[in-house]
Image (cartoon, grey):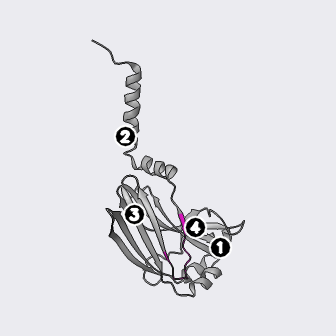
């Protein structure tokens, strides 16, 4: 009877461990974030623009749409938040699965300060501005929506239909800029 060499056993065992870990959501998300960091795209609210954001999913993962908000300083972001709920916004989102030359709509919604249960500018997560407008800049992030995306290419279109006074309200609240990000997320409780 011939014994299996130790190298073969170690190699097979390592492969089995790696394959089992890649099935774990925690590992898939961290690996995806490390290898393919999410793009942060400027979303200048109050200008009536439509911004498109593409996502390449390399395996089924839960993704979340974030509105990232840059403030002039830490105080405006975390302490003096009274002006945040006064910011009027109106945005429509359409997300498509791009497959075989077709655009298949899989998510559509409209968001407004008048109808949303939670105001977009009441952000709850810290966010580090990538290219801050000032040395004292601070950031917050607000999770807007999440969904499972299997392997494939996707695009979400964000259409800003906010009233023009949003610019003055954002300035009064200390907001310098807004950005979009669609990133893998570890959804422990859904």
SS class, disc 2 = helix
Q: Quadrant of the C terminus?
A: bottom left
Residue ID for mark 2? 20
CA gap, disc 1 to disc 2?
Answer: 45 Å
In the rendered structure, which segment of residues is drawn in magenta? 40-50
Residue ID for mark 3? 154
Q: What is the crowding at mark 2: few (fewer than 14 residues within 10 Å), some, or many (at least 20)?
A: few
Q: Is residue 61 visible?
A: yes
Q: What is the crowding at mark 1: few (fewer than 14 residues within 10 Å), some, or many (at least 20)?
A: many
The reply to whether dot 3 and dot 2 touch (C-beta < 8 Å) is: no
The reply to whether the magenta stretch includes residue 6 is: no
Residue mark closest to the camera, 3 vs 4: 3
Image quarter of residue 46: bottom right
Q: Residue at x 50, y 49 (%)?
A: 35
SS class, disc 1 = helix
Residue mark closest to the camera, 3 vs 2: 3
CA gap, disc 3 to disc 4?
Answer: 25 Å
Count of labels shown? 4
- 78 vs 66, left or right, is right
Marking on residue 140: 4
Residue ID for mark 1? 76
Q: Quadrant of the N terminus?
A: top left
Image quarter of residue 92: bottom left
Q: Using the image, determine if residue 11 lies above or below residue 24.
A: above
Residue mark closest to the camera, 1 vs 2: 2
């Amino acid at each position: 009877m011939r014994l299996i060499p130790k190298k073969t056993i170690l190699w097979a065992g390592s492969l089995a461990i790696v394959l089992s870990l890649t099935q774990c959501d925690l590992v898939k998300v961290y690996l995806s974030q490390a290898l393919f960091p999410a793009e942060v795209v400027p979303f200048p609210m109050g200008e009536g623009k439509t911004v498109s954001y593409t996502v390449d999913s390399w395996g089924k993962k839960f993704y979340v749409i974030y509105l990232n908000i840059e403030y002039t300083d830490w105080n405006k972001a975390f302490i003096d938040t009274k002006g945040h709920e006064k910011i009027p916004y109106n945005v429509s989102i359409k997300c498509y699965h791009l497959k075989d030359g077709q655009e298949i709509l899989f998510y559509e919604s409209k968001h407004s300060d008048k109808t949303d249960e939670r105001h977009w500018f009441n952000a709850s997560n810290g966010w580090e501005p990538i290219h801050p407008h000032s040395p004292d800049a601070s950031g917050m992030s607000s999770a807007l929506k999440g969904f499972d995306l299997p392997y494939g290419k996707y695009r979400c279109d964000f259409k800003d239909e906010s009233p023009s006074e949003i610019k003055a309200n954002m300035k009064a609240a200390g907001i310098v800029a807004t950005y979009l990000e669609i990133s893998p997320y570890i959804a422990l409780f859904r």
